[in-house]
Image (tube, helix red, strand yellow):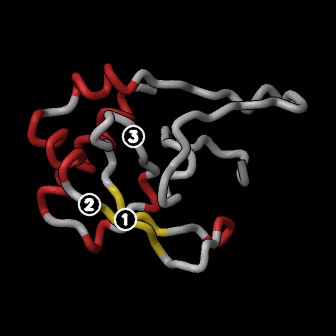
Amino acid sequence: SHTTREFPLHTDCCFEDAPPRFMALVCVRGDAHGGGLSQLLDTRLLMRQLSASALRTLHATTFRFRVPAEFAKGVPYVEGRIVSRHGLWRYRGEVVMREHCTRAQVAALDELDACLASAR
């Protein structure tokens, strides 16, 4: 992480053309002040919390994900669905380019953000 602040729930590598299917977390050295806690969320439970409309929008429409400078790939953004046809997720709220979203997409993102906030 690049900060000592809490980071909202997200998936890593959401701005890759093909995000990895599996991730590994390794702790080289524990935080001396007790930080660095990781929270995992079963996305099957998340899918049950979302309305059918939001889930359909996240699954069936394409979103733009801004590529952060520290992960520069030579392109300013990548496009993809938040929920793939295989039920895999990609999401990091601050890199979704909401200015390019439809009203339905913004509503689905707002609902997703509310569900993620309640999972904390």
In this view, 65 is above or below 35: below
Q: Position of residue 25 (x, y in %)?
A: 71, 31
Q: Secondary structure at mark 1?
A: strand
Q: Position of residue 35 (x, y in %)?
A: 75, 31
Q: Are marks 2 and 3 in contact (CB under 8 Å)?
A: no
How packed mark 2 is, by other alpha carbons closer than 10 Å (few <14, some 14-19, many 20 or more), is some
> Residue at the spot x=65%, y=45% of the render?
5
Q: CA distance from mark 2 to mark 1?
A: 6 Å
Between marks 1 and 3, how big is the CA–CA gap?
Answer: 13 Å
Rendered image quadrant of residue 68: bottom right
At 46% from the left and 72% from the top, the residue drawn is: 77
Quickly name the residue at label 1. Answer: 79
Amino acid type, residue under disc 1 in the picture:
Glu
Q: Residue at x 56, y 26 (%)?
A: 39
Local packing at callout 3 (Cα closer than 10 Å; few below 14, some 14-19, many 20+) is some
Number of the label disc, if any, that sits on residue 62: 2
Residue 76 visible in the snapshot: yes
Name the N-terminal-most of marks 2 and 1.
2
Judged from the image, the secondary structure of the residue bearing numbered disc 3 is: loop
- Point out the tag, 2 or 3, that comes first from the N-terminus: 2
For residue 89, which numbered disc appears in the image? 3
**x 55%, y 44%: residue:** 20
* Residue count near mark 1 (Cα–Cα under 10 Å), binned few <14, some 14–19, many ≥20: some
Query: Which amino acid does the dot numbered 3 rest on?
Result: Trp
> In the rendered structure, which amino acid carries the disc numbered 2?
Thr
- The reply to whether residue 32 is visible in this rendering is no
Marks 2/1 in contact by CB < 8 Å: the verdict is: yes
Q: CA distance from mark 2 to mark 3?
A: 13 Å
Check if mark 1's residue and mark 3's residue have beta carbons within 8 Å. no
* Badge 1 or badge 3: first in the primary sequence: 1
Q: Secondary structure at mark 2?
A: loop
